[in-house]
């Protein structure tokens, strides 16, 4: 229905456009006056008014209407079944909905039937509100703007103001997203920290990670939420990835920017782009199905025990994933070192290699460091490869042949696990917040570095 | 170089020599250059190798999901057997006992199968989905009731994988003698060949004995250890009683050790000796004989004689027949999922011409299933399509309008600056964090349905937004200011100049960036897992609020399943995913080529 | 047709350093230099003049094979340094460039200290046995670049912090530090103000005592001031080559005269 209403309002807006522009044209034709704005701008003004007010009301009502219906039903459930856990209450609610919509519910009963009736009533009110307020609002807006059509009315300036405001809102969505991320992460993080009585040091430096085993009446056992093994595991895999990706990516960039012939470039660059375009889930599949067994069997053959979910397999594959990232960023930086510096060095009789090592690379160093920082931040936040190829158990070790777990693996395990969402969300969102802060710091640092570097040569 | 120091203004202090005479220093410098180049080539080589390894491993696995197998059999659609009336229609037919009918078809084919385990193994040759398909077919054509039709029953994953040699191969061994088979008093069969046809198999069985002996020696070593421990404890014992007890234990362990070592030595001696008779168990490769129209499994083997048991109906006794085959499996029964019985059944069906292999269309036309042979990607494909539609519908307009604002209208102030930093940072936020955002805000606060393409699309749109904004800004920047100035010069407003002149010229670049952003979103998995798109969904979604999954998440789910057959399907799904990505990137390249403009 | 051969070569007084015969240069399909013959003498400043795009810089870059760094550039003909063909397969351009130094249009100091800028060449060519040697070379070169007095107190400050004129003299000093025999200068003063230009011109005149200097310039006054020989290029042809005094007072080719009097350019 929402979809139909959306279309209906759009149709109204078009009608408003036609009516207003026609009226403006008529005014221009009959009167001996000069229109400030061309008729189509009068139309546009009406169009924008109808569309924005109609869709705006609709969006608001959909979001808050759903919230209103759900919360009022939930409070009724809470009264009727005060002992039920949140998840049970949600189940009751979805059953009631199913009954109301004539679908098959998992269970029926007096409470569910009553709820279904109430749901149907609320839903009807909601639907009517959508229709009346949405269409009505749009209609009123159309009426208002239609009435404004007059020769001296600056329809163009006003519509442009509206357009600018819309543009600003669109650009502002990025900020809303950030605010949304920060708020949702902080909220759960606070809850989690209060559940462990603000012993944040135990979260940061504790070595036992088993957050769901010590849950009791909303409190968590602070001795079991030590995320250090997760941080260490993330670090270990990231380190392996960097050992693979930094030299390979950097040397590839050096070679492609200053040494390779056009032919080599023409095939190597698309190759790296393909590598960059492969979804991480494919890398994860490769790590889990091909590389990990290969390493395990290879290790067995030479008498070394390699875990089948070793950090090595995940790290190597993650490194391969990061190669194109480092090579393309470094390539950009190396290319932006001015040719005049290269000429100066070559003109003095330096070889290309000497020019690269002693002039170009030192000049490009800040950019390369920032590329590596970005790559590290990406490796830390990478999820699928480690979810598929790294371990689940929090294991504090520096041995790359053993299985370790990472922050992202634990987030996935907690959110998709069987535990009640309420309980699992705390540690999961706290890990997410840690991840967010960590990567944010690295990105900011990388951007600072690169901005300084660009200032120097642009 | 004394002259330099005394007279800095003096003449040149160094002669570089002839330009053709390479000094050793120069050689060293050239060598260093070569080395750097070699590192570069090696780096590109490594990247190329990784790409080839990755793609070839995926394609190699995927190729095994290219075909599926059917078992063709005659089936009588007896309404009585189905438990319905002859003029039944619709749901009545759908609910009829096609399961039992199918089971009966297989039992009719191999009536000698007896016992629960064996019968279940027989039933497992056919997919659990086959009866439903048959039911669907009859529901569509109720007139077939009472008829006998030839029907292609979908083979199970075990059958399919065996036929694709996934469980090793069945090798025919050369035989030169003629075979006689007699039934012995204890019910076993005695097989005798006139030549030493079983010698190869015997050697292989014996080779296995060394492993057994090795196991025994490991056990013996453990006893040695135990002896040491008990002796130590006896020394440390505080009471006489305890000491005696420990010593007794030590003695026992020593005896055990000796026994084990003796046994190991005996086995090794047996293995080394020529000829002899050895038992064949399921740790050994299976030895199968095809004779008299049936199959026999060997349980004991010597050079020319063997003891065996009937697997499928065999005409007995056989007197000096040369028409026989001797087969070995490449894997022992205990390490493969297909049993010896199933192997001979499948081989028999193959001989009877009842096995059919076809292209696996089902993979593209059916949705997810727990049974690998039934599972397809249609649901995931539609889910991906719906999700991408939502993502595009949100991210493209928002991204383009946002970019126009930033490039054309934003005043140079701290807010704009903050906005830009914000967008750049958002581009580098780990995707899983966007998933958490979706979970906390869109699912829990706004009540967007879980697992729905709508939720996935919103999350992916927010994730791709920075990419699109950055690409769109670059494209707008590439339009020279002269165009804008020209428009302003003829009296256009800022908004008119942007929308009438700059935006159309920047559109190809914006579209290219958008496609690349969409390609990223198409391959994204982690945030969708967070919002529940990882659930098991059998139905193909029909709208953006239905529960759905998407291709990359399907890949993730399947890769997690224990059934071997899912491996090939996972790889095949990856191939489809990659195909879409390649197409999208090609489109971007074409767009870039077609509209590329140099100002 | 402007394919007329060059003017009669002036009588030589010094030994010949560079001799170029029948040189053609192509950029892809563009024929940038057409059949040019030039003799460059030792201890002489030779100026290349001509309108923009006439090929004078291109020709200059042939003399130390800097054109090798451009993929689509192709050089034909015979260029000899002290009688040795510099495009011979056996020649390592690195070795050649050590003997034929170059100063560019825009000052391009490395983003390193003044000291490291000068020491770069001597280091890569192994001209100094130890730190003391290197110190001597740096001081000597900076003195020859006529910039020693201005920078001697801040040798370890970045070279990019100097003024434009100072930067260019630093670049000249840097080129001198590798002990070249020939110095190529590609419009070395075009990015400098008049005072800095005067300082660099003075320096060029001093350098003549030890090097052959080839300078590409847009400014005819500059050519007249600093050079003893002048070559006039037009549309890839060498139109006229001879003593500077003769070219500027009594040109043989009408195109030279037109250019000098300001009718083409």
Image (cartoon, helix red, strand yellow):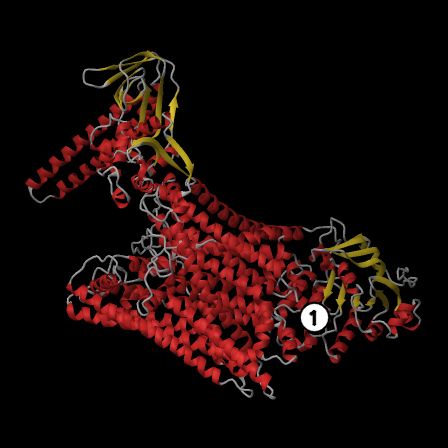
Residue depicted at x 60% and y 58%: A257
Foreground: C59 or C206?
C59
Left or right, A394 with reference to B599 = left
In the rendered image of this protein, does residue B489 appear above or below residue C118?
A: below
Foreground: A64 or B3?
A64
Foreground: A11 or A381?
A11
Left or right, B256 with reference to B297 = left
Residue B297 sits in quarter: top left
**SS class of the residue under badge 1?**
loop
How far from the left and from the top, in percent, is residue B37? Answer: 59, 51
Pointer 1 residue: C106
Quadrant of the frame with the C terminus of chain A: bottom right
Q: From where the camera sits, is residue A72 visible?
A: yes
How far from the left and from the top, in percent, is residue C246? Answer: 91, 70
Residue depicted at x 59% and y 68%: B504
In the rendered image of this protein, does residue C200 appear above or below residue A343?
A: below
Foreground: C213 or A208?
A208
Left or right, A140 with reference to C172 = left
Quadrant of the frame with the N terminus of chain A: bottom left
Residue depicted at x 52% and y 69%: A450
In the rendered image of this protein, does residue A432 appear above or below residue A301?
A: below
How far from the left and from the top, in percent, is residue A158? Answer: 51, 83
Residue depicted at x 32% and y 63%: B449
Left or right, C144 with reference to A374 = right
Local packing at callout 1 (Cα closer than 10 Å; few below 14, some 14-19, many 20+) is: some
């Amino acid at each position: 229905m929402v979809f139909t209403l959306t279309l209906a309002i759009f149709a109204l807006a078009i009608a408003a456009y036609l009516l207003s522009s026609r009226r403006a044209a008529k005014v221009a034709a009959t009167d001996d006056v000069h229109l400030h704005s061309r008729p189509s701008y009068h139309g546009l003004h009406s169009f924008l008014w109808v569309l924005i007010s109609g869709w705006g009301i609709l969006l608001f009502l959909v979001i808050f209407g759903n919230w209103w219906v759900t919360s009022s039903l939930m409070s009724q459930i809470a009264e009727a079944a005060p002992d039920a856990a949140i998840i049970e209450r949600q189940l009751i609610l979805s059953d009631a909905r199913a009954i109301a919509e004539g679908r098959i519910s998992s269970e029926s009963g007096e409470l569910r039937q009553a709820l279904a009736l109430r749901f149907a009533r609320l839903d009807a009110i909601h639907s009517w509100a959508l229709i009346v307020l949405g269409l009505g609002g749009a209609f009123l807006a159309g009426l208002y703007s239609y009435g404004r059509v007059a020769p001296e009315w600056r329809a163009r300036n006003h519509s442009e103001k509206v357009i600018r405001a819309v543009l600003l809102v669109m650009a502002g969505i990025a900020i809303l997203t950030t605010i949304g991320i920060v708020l949702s992460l902080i909220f759960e993080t606070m809850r989690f920290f209060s559940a462990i009585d603000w012993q944040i040091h135990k979260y940061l430096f504790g070595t036992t990670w088993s957050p769901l085993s010590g849950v009791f009446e909303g409190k968590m056992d602070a001795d079991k939420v030590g995320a250090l093994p997760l941080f260490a595991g993330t670090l270990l895999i990231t380190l392996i990835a960097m050992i693979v990706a930094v030299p390979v990516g950097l040397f590839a960039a050096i070679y492609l920017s200053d040494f390779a012939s056009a032919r080599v470039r023409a095939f190597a660059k698309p190759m790296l782009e393909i590598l960059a375009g492969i979804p991480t889930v494919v890398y994860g599949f490769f790590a889990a199905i091909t590389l990990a067994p290969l390493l395990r069997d290879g290790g067995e053959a030479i008498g070394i025990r390699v875990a089948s979910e070793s950090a090595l397999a995940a790290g190597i594959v993650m490194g391969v994933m990061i190669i194109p990232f480092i090579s393309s960023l470094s390539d950009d930086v190396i290319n932006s070192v001015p040719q005049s510096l290269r000429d100066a060095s070559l003109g003095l009789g330096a070889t290309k290699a000497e020019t690269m090592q002693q002039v170009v690379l030192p000049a490009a160093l800040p950019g390369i460091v920032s590329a590596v920082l970005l790559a590290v931040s990406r490796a830390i936040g990478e999820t699928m490869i480690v979810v598929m190829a790294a371990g689940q158990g929090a294991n504090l070790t520096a041995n790359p042949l053993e299985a370790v777990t990472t922050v992202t693996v634990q987030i996935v395990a907690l959110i998709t696990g069987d535990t009640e969402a309420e309980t699992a969300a705390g540690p999961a969102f706290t890990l997410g917040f840690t991840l967010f802060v960590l990567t944010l710091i690295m990105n900011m640092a990388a951007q600072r570095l690169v901005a300084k570097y660009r200032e120097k040569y642009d | 170089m004394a002259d330099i120091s005394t007279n800095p203004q003096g003449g040149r202090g160094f002669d570089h020599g002839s330009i053709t005479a390479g000094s050793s220093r120069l050689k060293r410098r050239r060598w260093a250059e070569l080395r750097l180049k070699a590192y570069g080539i090696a780096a590109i080589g490594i990247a190329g190798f990784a790409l080839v390894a990755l793609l070839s491993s995926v394609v190699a696995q995927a190729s095994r999901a290219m075909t599926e197998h059917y078992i063709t059999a005659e089936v009588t659609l007896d309404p009585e057997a189905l438990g319905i009336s002859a003029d039944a229609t619709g749901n009545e037919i759908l609910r009829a006992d096609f399961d039992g009918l199918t089971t009966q078809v297989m039992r009719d084919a191999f009536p000698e199968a007896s016992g629960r385990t064996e019968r279940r193994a027989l039933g497992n040759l056919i997919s659990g989905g086959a009866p439903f398909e048959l039911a669907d077919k009859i529901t569509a054509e109720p007139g077939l009731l009472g008829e006998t039709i030839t029907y292609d029953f979908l083979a199970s994953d075990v059958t399919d994988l065996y036929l694709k040699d996934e469980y090793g191969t069945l090798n025919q061994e050369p035989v030169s003698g003629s075979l006689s088979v007699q039934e012995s008093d204890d019910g076993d069969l005695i097989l005798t060949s006139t030549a030493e046809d079983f010698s190869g198999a015997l050697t292989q069985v014996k080779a296995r004995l060394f492993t057994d002996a090795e196991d025994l020696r490991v056990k013996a070593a453990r006893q040695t250890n135990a002896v040491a421990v008990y002796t130590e404890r006896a020394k440390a014992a505080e009471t006489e009683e305890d000491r005696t007890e420990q010593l007794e234990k030590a003695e026992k362990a020593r005896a055990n050790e000796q026994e084990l070592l003796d046994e190991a030595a005996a086995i090794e001696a047996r293995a080394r000796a020529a000829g002899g008779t050895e038992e064949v168990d399921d740790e050994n490769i299976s030895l199968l004989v095809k004779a008299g129209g049936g199959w026999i499994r060997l349980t004991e083997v010597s050079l020319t004689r063997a003891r065996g048991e009937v697997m499928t109906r065999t005409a007995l006794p056989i007197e000096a027949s040369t028409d026989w085959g001797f087969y070995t499996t490449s894997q022992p029964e205990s390490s493969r999922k297909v049993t010896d019985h199933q192997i001979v059944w499948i081989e028999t069906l193959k001989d009877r011409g009842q096995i059919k292999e076809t292209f696996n269309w089902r993979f593209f036309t059916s949705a997810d299933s727990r049974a690998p042979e039934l599972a397809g990607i249609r649901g995931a494909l539609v889910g991906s399509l719906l999700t991408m539609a939502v993502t595009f519908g949100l991210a493209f307009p928002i991204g383009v309008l946002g970019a126009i604002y930033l490039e054309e209208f934003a005043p140079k102030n701290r807010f704009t600056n903050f906005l830009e930093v914000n967008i750049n940072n958002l581009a580098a936020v780990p995707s899983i964090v966007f998933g958490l955002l979706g979970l906390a805000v869109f699912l829990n606060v706004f009540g967007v349905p879980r697992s729905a393409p709508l939720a996935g699309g919103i999350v992916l749109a927010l994730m791709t937004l920075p990419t699109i904004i950055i690409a769109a800004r670059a494209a707008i920047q590439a339009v020279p200011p002269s165009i804008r100035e020209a428009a302003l010069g003829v009296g256009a407003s800022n908004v008119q100049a942007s929308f009438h002149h700059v935006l159309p010229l920047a559109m190809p670049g914006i579209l290219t960036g958008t496609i690349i952003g969409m390609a990223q979103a198409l391959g994204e998995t982690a945030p969708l897992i967070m919002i529940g798109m990882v659930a098991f969904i059998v139905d193909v979604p029909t709208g953006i609020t239905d529960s759905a999954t998407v291709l990359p998440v399907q890949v993730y789910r399947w890769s997690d399943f224990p059934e071997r057959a899912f491996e090939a399907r996972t790889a095949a799904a990856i191939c489809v995913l990659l195909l879409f990505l390649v197409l999208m990137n090609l489109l971007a390249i074409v767009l870039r080529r077609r509209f590329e403009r140099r100002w | 047709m402007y394919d007329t051969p060059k003017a009669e070569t002036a009588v030589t007084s010094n030994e010949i350093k560079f001799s170029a015969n029948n040189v053609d240069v192509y950029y892809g399909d563009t024929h940038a230099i057409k059949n040019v013959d030039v003799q460059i003498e030792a201890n002489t400043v030779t100026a290349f003049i001509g309108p923009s795009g006439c090929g004078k810089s291109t020709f200059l870059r042939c003399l130390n094979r800097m054109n090798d760094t451009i993929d689509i550039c192709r050089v034909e003909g015979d260029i000899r340094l002290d009688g040795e063909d510099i495009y011979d397969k056996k020649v390592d351009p690195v070795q050649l460039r050590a003997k034929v130094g170059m100063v560019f249009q825009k000052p391009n100091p490395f983003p390193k200290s003044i000291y490291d800028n000068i020491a770069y060449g001597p280091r890569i060519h192994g001209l100094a046995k130890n730190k003391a040697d290197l110190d001597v070379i740096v001081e000597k070169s900076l003195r020859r670049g006529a910039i020693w007095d201005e920078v001697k107190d801040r040798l370890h400050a970045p070279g990019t912090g100097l003024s434009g004129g100072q930067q260019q003299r630093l670049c000249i000093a840097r080129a001198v530090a590798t002990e070249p025999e020939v110095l190529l200068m590609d419009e070395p003063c075009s990015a400098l103000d008049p005072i800095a230009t005067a300082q660099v011109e003075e320096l060029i005149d001093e350098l003549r005592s030890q090097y052959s200097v080839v300078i590409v310039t847009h400014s005819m006054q500059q050519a007249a001031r600093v050079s003893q020989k002048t070559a006039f290029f037009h549309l890839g042809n060498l139109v006229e080559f001879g003593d500077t005094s003769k070219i500027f007072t009594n040109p043989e080719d009408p195109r030279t005269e037109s250019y000098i009097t300001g009718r083409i350019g």
